[in-house]
Image (spheres, rainbow, N blue to C red):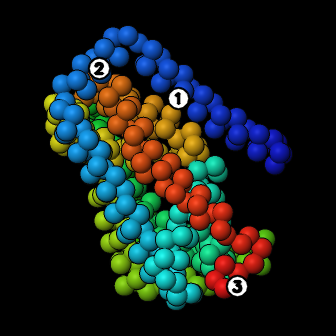
């Protein structure tokens, strides 16, 4: 039997192995002279003005993306504590800074709720989880459909197997939707676990979340999903114009799905993203380095750049008191 310490080290070892293999894969691709020459020729064929314009659009979309997340955070937390748009902004970017150094972005919870009143932080973390779960629902639904499409398109499988995979994908997606619109079940389940009964009172806030609120949060999450999907599409249309739109978008959905399942940290996430994207897009393009460059750039714009912005707010947080005074 594995002890808690053994499991901790095993988990760390798995994460380290994934990141290490991903780095090795990227190095092998980038050090390939043929790949480098193809990428250089590809970039040289694109007009400089078009490249700079595309980068500007992706940056603007990054701010749009986080604008809607700020609105969502301000909305979902309002019954616990009303916060201004500026406070919600500082809260969000603090969370992004904390997330970059913690596994699976768990630090985002601690960073974001610090700007709430101390008595509201636990319930705020629970409601923040609802907002993040809404994003996961979309990633899971579209990702499952993308995988079903991938199997049907690129793998030589019998029609009966393809049909079964489509059915499983739909059931999988609907299960997430069902759980999302019944988040109060989580409060019930927490109450049934003996060692969690002491914190059940914090989960009681889920009973007050209405279906209308859940729809609004899901809508804001969908807008964000469309925005960061568009960032990939825009860059790929410019750099890899030979790609058809449907395969391009479906691969993006699968990429999001796999990213959400793999244990890693934002600071190393570009290696895993590049590894997954290069293997996925290998079915529709030979431009490995171009795909990795696109994925790495969006990783930097959407996660690393906001984390640097958030570091300014992190320095002004009172870690031992009320940040609302």
Structural crowding at the residue carrying mark 2, measured as other residues with C-alpha within 10 Å and reported as few (<14), some (14–19) or many (≥20): few
Q: Quadrant of residue 240?
A: top left
Left or right of residue 88: residue 318:
right
> Compared with residue 24, is residue 196 higher up or lower down, i.e. above or below?
below
Question: Which residue in the structure is indicated by mark 3?
Answer: 119
Looking at the rendered image, the disc whose residue lies closer to the viewer, 2 or 1, is 2
Looking at the rendered image, the disc whose residue lies closer to the viewer, 1 or 3, is 3
Left or right of residue 115: residue 145:
left
| Residue sitting at x 59%, y 58% | 311
Front residue of 264 and 192 = 264
Residue 135 in picture, x, y percent from top left: 42, 62
Structural crowding at the residue carrying mark 3, measured as other residues with C-alpha within 10 Å and reported as few (<14), some (14–19) or many (≥20): few
**Which numbered marker is on residue 40?**
2
Nearer the N terminus, badge 3 or badge 2?
Answer: 2
| Residue sitting at x 49%, y 71% | 89
Question: Which residue in the structure is indicated by mark 1?
Answer: 22
């Amino acid at each position: 039997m594995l002890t808690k310490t053994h499991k901790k080290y095993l988990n760390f070892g798995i994460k380290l192995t994934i990141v290490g293999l991903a780095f090795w894969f990227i190095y092998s691709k980038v050090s390939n002279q043929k790949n480098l020459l193809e990428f250089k020729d590809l970039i040289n064929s694109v007009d400089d003005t078009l490249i700079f314009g595309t980068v500007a659009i992706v940056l603007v979309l990054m701010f749009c993306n986080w604008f809607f997340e700020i609105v969502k955070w301000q909305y979902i937390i309002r019954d616990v504590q009303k916060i201004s748009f500026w406070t919600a902004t500082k809260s969000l970017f603090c969370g992004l800074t904390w997330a970059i150094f913690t596994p699976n972005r768990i630090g985002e919870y601690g960073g974001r709720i610090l700007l709430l009143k101390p008595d509201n932080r636990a319930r705020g973390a629970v409601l923040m989880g609802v907002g993040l779960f809404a994003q996961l629902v979309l990633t899971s639904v579209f990702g499952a459909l993308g995988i079903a499409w991938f199997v049907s398109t690129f793998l030589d499988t019998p029609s009966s197997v393809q049909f079964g995979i489509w059915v499983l994908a739909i059931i999988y997606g609907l299960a997430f939707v069902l759980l999302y619109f019944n988040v109060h079940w989580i409060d019930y389940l927490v109450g049934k676990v003996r060692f969690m009964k002491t914190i059940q009172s914090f989960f009681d806030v889920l009973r007050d979340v209405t279906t209308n609120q859940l729809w609004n949060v899901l809508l804001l999450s969908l807008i964000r999903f469309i925005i960061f999907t568009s960032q990939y599409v825009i860059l790929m249309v410019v750099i890899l114009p030979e790609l058809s739109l449907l395969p391009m978008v479906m691969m993006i959905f699968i990429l999001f799905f796999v990213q959400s399942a793999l244990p890693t940290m934002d600071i190393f996430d570009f290696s895993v993203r590049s590894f997954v994207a290069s293997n996925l897009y290998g079915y529709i393009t030979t431009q490995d380095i171009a795909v990795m460059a696109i994925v790495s750039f969006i990783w930097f714009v959407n996660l690393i750049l906001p984390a640097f912005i958030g570091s300014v707010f992190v320095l002004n947080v009172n870690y031992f008191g009320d940040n609302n005074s």
